[in-house]
Image (cartoon, rainbow, N blue to C red):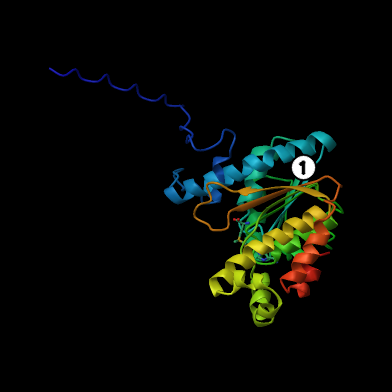
Amino acid sequence: MAKSKPAKPAPAADAKPAVHPDIRPGQSIELLKELHILTREGQLNQDSRRKLKQVYHLYQFIEPLLAEVLAGTGDLTLADHGAGKSYLGFILYDLFLKSKEAGTVYGIETRKELVAHSRELVARLDFPRMRFLDVSVEESTGSAELPATIDVVTALHACNTATDDAIRFALAKQARFVVLVPCCQAEVASVLRKNKNASFGLTPLSEIWRHPIHTREFGSQLTNVLRCLQLEAHGYQLTVTELVGWEHSMKNELIIARRTDAPRKNAMERLEKILEELNLTELRSRFAC
Ligand SMILES: C[S@@+](CC[C@H](N)C(=O)[O-])C[C@H]1O[C@@H](n2cnc3c(N)ncnc32)[C@H](O)[C@@H]1O
């Protein structure tokens, strides 16, 4: 006769509900519900599990940078551009800054309803050192609501040229770290396309972007190459890698820039040369500045 399994002991009446193994210790369950990562019942569905994994993955890259800044100066400012629903800012605050006495996160976002929602959430969760500005990245550089310098600048899938504006912002604010996961940028591809006929006569390299799909793909890669050279020309040392776990998106390049104040000697020269050789000199004011 098969032995019957011993019955599980009933949970104590005051036992806390089990925390999901995918959720980091200390993470606010209320925040995850508000961000719709957890359902109202506290469950993770497949989509939200993926989203959570992605944000945690990015967190692993950013957390040591925050710790370094805080250890050095005792304070920290972070500006997240194209914040959207501010998953990143909220998770960084919740996991890292909430337990500290210093450090402020600023979310920059043009969609007023998203900014209003984030402000409500901040009040409800009592996260006093989070602020949200409903301005564009470009406008934020001159905003009186932001300090003169910002330690860490992030831009996660900020649309089109918003990533480029975030780089300018970082340079103007003398950021110590810049963390970018660029979105598609259509500007470089559109200039390659516009000048295609003229470029045929100028350089055999124009074969690289002759077919429309190549124009788009090459334009996108070239944009990130130009951004990297621009940052290096301004004294940043780069790590350029893949944001693993971001498989749902083609846009999974991660650029982490650390200010060293030692510009790579030939970076600006090379940037200028690339613009010239690829017939893109009209983009000088975007990248070579
Ligand atoms: C693809 S969403 C990414 C949101 C968020 N960073 C994330 O990864 O979940 C891009 C966001 O950038 C905002 N955005 C686009 N251009 C902007 C600009 N120039 N200034 C500020 N926000 C911008 C959009 O409104 C949108 O919310």
Which image quadrant: the C terminus?
A: bottom right
Identified at 44% across, 43% down, the residue is 43
Q: Is residue 15 left or right of residue 102?
A: left
Residue 275: quarter of image? bottom right
- Residue 214 in picture, x, y percent from top left: 57, 69
The foreground one among 96 and 14 is 96
The foreground one among 245 and 214 is 214
Residue 67 can be seen, yes or no: yes
Amino acid type indicated by mark 1: Gly
Instruction: Give the crowd class for mark 1: few <14, some 14-19, many >=20 residues within 10 Å.
Output: some
* Ligand 1 located in image quadrant: bottom right
Identified at 19% across, 17% down, the residue is 3
- Element marked by disc 1: loop
Compared with residue 210, is residue 11 higher up or lower down, i.e. above or below? above
Identified at 46% across, 48% down, the residue is 40
The residue that mark 1 highlights is 103
Residue 231: quarter of image? bottom right
Compared with residue 142, is residue 15 higher up or lower down, i.e. above or below? above
Which image quadrant: the N terminus?
A: top left
